[in-house]
Amino acid sequence: MNQQEMSDRIANGQGFIAALDQSGGSTPKALRGYGIADGAWNGDDEMFAAIHEMRTRIIESPCFGNGKVIGAILFEKTMDGMSGGKPVPARLAERGIVPFIKVDKGLEDEANGVQLMKPNPGLEDLCNRARALGVFGTKMRSVIKSANPVGIRQIVDQQFAEGARILSTGLVPMLEPEYDIHAADRAEGEKLLLADLMNGLDALPEGQQVIFKLSIPVEPNLYAPLIAHPKVLRVVALSGGYSTEEACDKLAQNCGMIASFSRGLLQDLRAQQSDDEFDATLGGAMDQIHAASVA
């Protein structure tokens, strides 16, 4: 797929985006969920080798290339690795899956009810290297903890500012100002977030587009104005700690919003499963997430 074909796939594809981008801090938890205890690996190299084996098992599963997954978000080390004898981005594109890369460097401590992203001085270099490998876009996450107008505006401004840096390299940024699903004031805060995101889009130069990755809103279809906006390529949903069933039920109430789940996709996969068991479990989750995304 070339750049335009990838853009069309994300904009119009009837499917969802798989989140395979657990980073160093979240990898041990992901491995434990996969049935690999902390004592089974020694040091970062073995840890990342174990998570890469899990990811390549997913990528090479027969069901993963059946058209229901239209994109996949990768961790940097996964982008640099191999799957099916080819660089991972090339292997994904060969299977009709648009590759993205997680580019943020983690979160700052909470202030004004939000956690901003840490500084990222090497962002352009990473984006240029990713583009050379055939990656289409990026993903970067920050977190909203409460309906603080100052903090929400700060988080949106930072997401758009970093997005401008990414756009300058030719990649499409996926902006992810996640709203903590446990926040008591989330319904109020999501309306503040929507207003600030719309203002950010108004300031975006003509001809540029972004993707939004957002928590499934308390009020169904709240983000319909974003979905309809000409500067938005797609709006996708994170599972945010919900189980697969909860996330799919809530997502199905939001027309035009598709899934980009991590936990919701991977929660029942285990290293100890046979290939047939693994493929059946993954395929069942994919069917459920796909149905909610195209509902």
Image: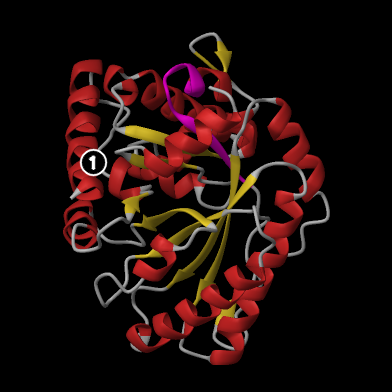
Horizontal and vertical percent position of residue 267: 28, 45
Q: Please tell me whether residue 81 is drawn above or below residue 247 in the rendered image.
A: above
Q: Please tell me whether residue 226 is drawn above or below residue 193 in the rendered image.
A: above
At 43% from the left and 66% from the top, the residue drawn is 226
At 38% from the left and 49% from the top, the residue drawn is 260
* Left or right placement of residue 272 versus residue 77 in this view: left
The kind of secondary structure element at disc 1 is helix
User: Where on the picture, by quarter, is residue 131?
Assistant: top right
Amino acid on which the number 1 mark rests in the picture = His
| In magenta stretch: residue 181 | no
Horizontal and vertical percent position of residue 163: 67, 58
Horizontal and vertical percent position of residue 273: 24, 24
Residue at the far top in the pictured view: 85
At 32% from the left and 56% from the top, the residue drawn is 257
At 32% from the left and 25% from the top, the residue drawn is 64
* Left or right placement of residue 108 versus residue 266 in this view: right
Taking depth in this image into account, of 172 and 109 the one nearest to the observer is 172
* Left or right placement of residue 106 versus residue 56 in this view: right
Badge 1 local density, few (<14 within 10 Å), some, or many (20+)? many
User: Where on the picture, by quarter, is residue 135?
Assistant: top right
Taking depth in this image into account, of 43 and 227 the one nearest to the observer is 227
Taking depth in this image into account, of 50 and 99 the one nearest to the observer is 99
Horizontal and vertical percent position of residue 120: 77, 57
The answer to whether residue 19 is seen in the rendering is no
- The number of callouts visible is 1
The answer to whether residue 243 is seen in the rendering is yes
Residue position for label 1: 290
Q: Over which residues does the magenta segment extend?
A: 92-102
Q: Please tell me whether residue 58 is drawn above or below residue 22 in the rendered image.
A: above
What colour scheme governs how the chains and residues are painted in the rendered image of this protein?
secondary structure
